[in-house]
Image: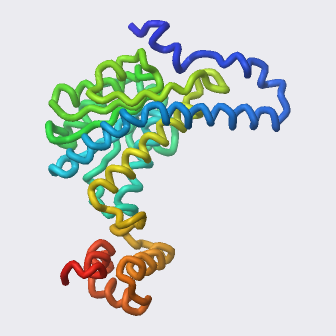
Amino acid sequence: MISVNEISATEAVLEETRDIDTWAVSRILSAIHREDGNAHAAVRRVLPQIGTAVEALAATLRAGGRWFNLGAGTSGRIGALDAAEIPPTFGLAPECVQAVIAGGEGALVRAVEGAEDRPQPAVVELEARGFGPGDALVAISASGQTPFTLAGLRAARAASALSVAITCNPLSALAREAEIAIVPEVGAEVIAGSTRMKGGLAQKMVLHMLSTTVMVRLGYVSGNLMSHMRPGSRKLEERALRIVTQVGGIDRDEARALLRDCGGDLGEATRRARGEGA
């Protein structure tokens, strides 16, 4: 049974907005903007824990393991969004960083009511993907009490895999049971319990800090350039040209020819542009 103390961190009522339904639009927007600033401050306070997770996740991927983001509702969608962006941005194969969301892929675009309350599907989905001791799970839940997410975390612990929690509730089971707990305490939401707001914002910040820094550590960034991205659109093809010219100190025609010789593989093109072999 979940205690009142365990859920109070994300279900608390923000006194300053009790009568928000009577406010002018400008006052509502100002309050939301002010509270979003508290999410930024909360993430700053957990930078050491994020750093610990970065090193652990980088070690997992370096050793050939996989990284799974797992969550329900807003948390699951944020995890899926971050995982989906890694292949085009950094050039990793899609299986390297995956997402598991309560309710399946359909829950990415439409809420699947009650899916978060069913723990077993999390275990079944991880087993179906061959999740094991060399992998890592990032379990995401603002309240830290979502049954689906807790089941995934416990499955990771049972498999002797790395377990990382991102939650806004320091008293939650998720925070207690994870090997590494990242707990930005954002406080009560402008609309009580609506953790798609500050809670979701803090979780998004933590995830993109994790994924970006892990990719930098693994060498998928040159300077601050996306040296391994996949140029799958005209905009990205143009960006790839700029990257090769900057990395190699060559003109656009040379960069275009080099990319063509490398079959569009930007990572290989930048490597050759730096003179690291043909």
Display colour scheme: rainbow
- Give the image location of residue 192, x and y in percent: 63, 21
Kindly tell me whether residue 229 is visible in this rendering: no
- The residue nearer to you, when weighing 39 against 111, is 39
Position of residue 215 measured from the top left corner of the image (x, y, whole percent)? 33, 55
Could one spot residue 249 in this view of the protein?
A: yes
Residue shown at the point (35%, 67%) measured from the top left: 222
Image quadrant in which the C terminus is located: bottom left
Q: Residue 50, how many percent across, how many down?
A: 37, 37
- Rendered view: 214 above or below 89: above
- The part of the image, by quadrant, that contains residue 123 is top left
| Horizontal arrangement in the rendering, residue 202 relative to residue 56 (left or right) | right
Residue at image coords 19%, 81%: 277
Quarter of the view holding residue 174? top left
The residue at 38%/65% (across/down) is 223
Number of marks present in the image shown: 0
- Where the N terminus falls, by quadrant? top left
Residue 20 placement, left or right of 224 = right
User: How far from the left and from the top, in percent, is residue 181?
Assistant: 35, 28
